[in-house]
């Protein structure tokens, strides 16, 4: 079983990589040996190879590829470890928002996705892969960068200020509120050993499942619901209410029975692992890009 401290370590390295991205920096050699954690904050002494780009106006296909390639050095030692890769991904997309999702999904072109670890049935995902977030969203990227860098990130200490999460939620534009919800959920997951046993986490996750269903991420919604029902195992009024609401939201969608069965099997994975799986399923099955 993966050590909890290791999961937190790679979650925070993922956060650090996202902060570098939001600063408009590409570090092509961000090896783990050059990184350290002091008082819970990731630090590096090697900035020799950093390249700067104009964020967000300078984001194009070339920069997206460079940002994705820059994720390989810090994950080189953990590429075969589903739990640690899922933790790194969670930290990166939590702070990176919609652009973070887009950059991490780019790794699929190099053969890295959740199905490397959780083997899917050969014929359940046939649709073309879509970008998790479409290009041409510089206003949304700028809005997210401002919210994170001005409110959540302390440039003097390098810390993520958890008390500022409500400020981020209220300050971002409508298109980014989903990613603010994602940020809150994934920060709640940072230490899974504690989180997965708490009602507050279950409610946070079920709220995000509702928002996912509204945005068209139907398998993300379904997977989170099934995972929380497995974790909870109790008839609690808030959980029952959310269950009914999510089921209602999903009724208008024709969810594949085969994919639902596959997701049910995947509930054996921890929350962050399952979260990656269902995100990938949505990317492989959507015929139209989701809103925002």
Image (cartoon, rainbow, N blue to C red):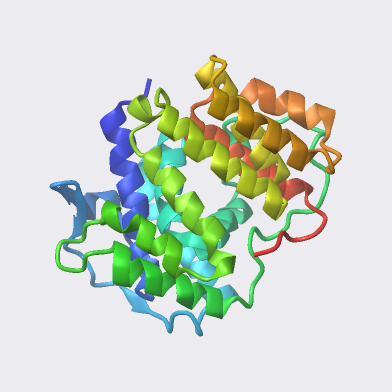
Which residue does the image show at 65% across and 40% down from the upper left? 221
Q: Could you tell me residue 59's position as x and y percent?
A: 52, 78
The picture places residue 283, in percent across and down from the top left corner, at 70, 50
* Towards the viewer: 70 or 56: 56
Q: Is residue 51 left or right of residue 98?
A: left
Query: Seen in the image, is 61 located left or right of residue 129?
Result: left
Depth check: give the residue in front, 155 or 166: 166
In which quarter of the view is residue 145 placed?
bottom left
- On the rendered structure, is 4 left or right of 262? left
Q: Position of residue 125 (x, y in %)?
A: 79, 40
Q: Where is the N terminus found, in terms of image quarters?
A: top left
Q: Is residue 32 above or below residue 95?
A: above
Residue 53 to residue 129: above or below:
below
Q: How many marks?
A: 0
Can you see residue 69?
A: no
Closest to the observer: 137 or 234?
Answer: 234
Q: Is residue 80 above or below residue 111?
A: above
Decide if residue 281 is in sight here.
yes
Query: Eyeballing the image, is 138 above or below 127?
Result: below
Residue 268 placement (x, y as % from top left): 56, 20
């Amino acid at each position: 079983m993966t050590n909890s401290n290791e999961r937190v370590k790679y979650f925070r390295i993922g956060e650090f990589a996202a902060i570098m991205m939001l600063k408009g920096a590409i570090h092509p050699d961000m090896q783990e040996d050059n990184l350290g954690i002091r008082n819970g904050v990731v630090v590096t002494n090697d900035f020799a190879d950093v390249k700067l780009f104009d964020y967000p106006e300078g984001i194009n296909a070339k920069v997206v590829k460079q940002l994705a390639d820059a994720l390989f050095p810090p994950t080189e030692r953990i590429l075969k470890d589903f739990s640690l890769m899922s933790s790194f991904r969670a930290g990166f997309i939590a702070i990176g928002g919609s652009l973070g999702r887009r950059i991490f999904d780019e790794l699929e072109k190099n053969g890295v996705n959740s199905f490397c670890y959780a083997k899917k049935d050969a014929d359940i995902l046939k649709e073309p892969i879509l970008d998790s977030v479409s290009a041409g969203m510089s206003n949304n990227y700028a809005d997210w960068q401002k919210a994170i860098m001005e409110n959540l990130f302390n440039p003097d200490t390098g810390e993520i200020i958890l008390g500022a999460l409500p400020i981020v939620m209220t300050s971002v534009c409508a298109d980014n509120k989903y990613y603010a919800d994602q940020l809150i959920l994934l920060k709640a997951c940072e230490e899974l050993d504690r989180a997965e046993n708490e009602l507050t986490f279950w409610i946070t996750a079920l709220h995000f499942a509702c928002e996912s269903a509204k945005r068209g991420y139907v398998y993300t919604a379904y997977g989170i619901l099934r995972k929380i029902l497995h974790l909870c195992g109790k008839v609690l009024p808030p959980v029952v209410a959310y269950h009914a609401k999510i089921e209602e939201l999903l009724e208008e969608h024709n969810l594949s029975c085969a994919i639902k069965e596959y997701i049910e099997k995947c509930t054996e994975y921890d929350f962050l692992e399952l979260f990656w799986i269902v995100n990938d399923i949505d990317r492989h099955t959507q015929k139209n890009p989701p809103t925002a």
